[in-house]
Amino acid sequence: MYTLGNIANIIDAELIGDATTKISGLASIDKAQKAQLSYVASDKHKPDLMRSNAGAVIITKSLIADCPTNALVVENVYLAFAKITHYFKQPAIQIGGIHPDAKINSENIANNCTIAKQVVIGKNCTISANTVIEQNVVIGDNALIQPNVTILQGCTIGNNVVISAGAVIGSEGFGNALDSKGHWHTIAHLGNVIIGNDVTIGANTVIDRGTLDDTQVCDGVRLDNLVHIAHNVILGKDSAIAAGVTIGGSATLGERCQIGGGAVIASHMYLSDDTIVTGSSTVDKNLNKGHYTGFTSISLHSDWKRNQMWLLKLNKIARYLNIKLKNLVSKQ
């Protein structure tokens, strides 16, 4: 636990408020409570800031008047947030073998597994060779964990889950802040991964933990091999993701979505229930229910934007030209 005075010194912030306020953790602006610190990096989150119950918020000068609580004022909010996350990250505790504090209700556990303290494993589970399960992981009943799986600290796995060989659950998300000298500062991801019931996860698939909130894979989801699910993603119930798909951070997929192999879904996208995306497509906008396909040959980004604008208008242009042609024919 740190005081706001401590935190202000760590991130070199101007403190507006009570320096003795104690902060026990970090949380997103819409979920933070009195003992938690949050941040707002842009004006688009001003409404959330004004409603926030956070004990303190990292902001820029432009948002001081809209901050209802203690403020830590900096020039680069994202960089300040990146620095402070490391002070609230719980270190992973690695030991060989099975920790005596682990609560294991299954007998089919390979001898060369690593299972840390405060792990809970349900009934009728199989934990195969070379699996690593860090502290505070909870695994439900009837799980099948194949060889060489890594489940990092704090993750929750539901009932009847299959995790295929080589998968990594709860890896650090890809978040970095750039300072004025062009150097990157890694953000420590403090959220977890929550996997529902009846989920299957393919070989060498990676699911990153959330930054502050949790990455969520809901009941009945099917993930093929070599899928990458980035931080803060939410996958709706009974969605199916084919091999090689990449889903960027904070994207949300509704229920029963189907994503073809090799597709890329950009960060912060929203796909409605029952959306289908053809393999190798790139999703760079929110999608309503329907079947979508989108891929073009690579080009300079500036050229691509101009070409894409015309591609989207081709149908209208064709209709216009057909009308003109019919008018010409009728006049002859």
Image: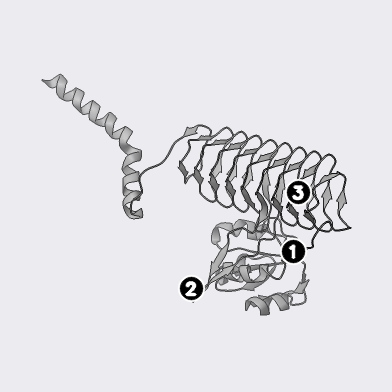
Instruction: Tell me the kind of residue under disc 1.
Output: Ala
Give coordinates of residue 118: x percent, y percent: 84, 56
Nearest to viewer (mark 3 / mark 2): 3
- Nearer the camera: disc 3 or disc 1: 1
The residue that appears at 56% across and 65% down in the rendered structure is 176
The numbered mark, 3 or 2, whose residue comes first in the sequence reads 3
Q: Residues within 10 Å of mark 3 (few under 14, many from 20)?
A: many
Q: Secondary structure at mark 2?
A: loop
State left or right for residue 283 relative to residue 227: left
Mark number displayed over residue 182: 2
Quadrant where the C terminus sits is top left
Q: Residue furthest front?
A: 111
**Image check: 188 left or right of 36?**
left
Amino acid type at circle 3 is: Thr
What x and y, as percent, mark residue 189? 66, 61
Which residue lies under the disc numbered 1? 92
Badge 2 density bin: few <14, some 14–19, many ≥20, Cα 10 Å: few
Secondary structure state at the residue bearing disc 3: strand
**Quarter of the picture holding the N terminus:** bottom right
Residue 164 percent across, percent down from the top left? 67, 43
In three-dimensional space, the C-alpha distance between marks 3 and 2, rounded to whole angstroms, equals: 37 Å
Q: CB atoms at circles 3 and 2 under 8 Å apart?
A: no
Calculate the distance from the C-alpha at mark 3 to the C-alpha at mark 1. Answer: 16 Å
Q: Foreground residue, 140 or 187?
A: 140
Picture quadrant of residue 125: top right
Residue 12, given in percent of the width and then of the height, sits at: 62, 79
Mark 1 Cα shell of 10 Å, populated few (<14), some (14-19), many (≥20):
few
Q: Which residue is mark 3?
A: 156
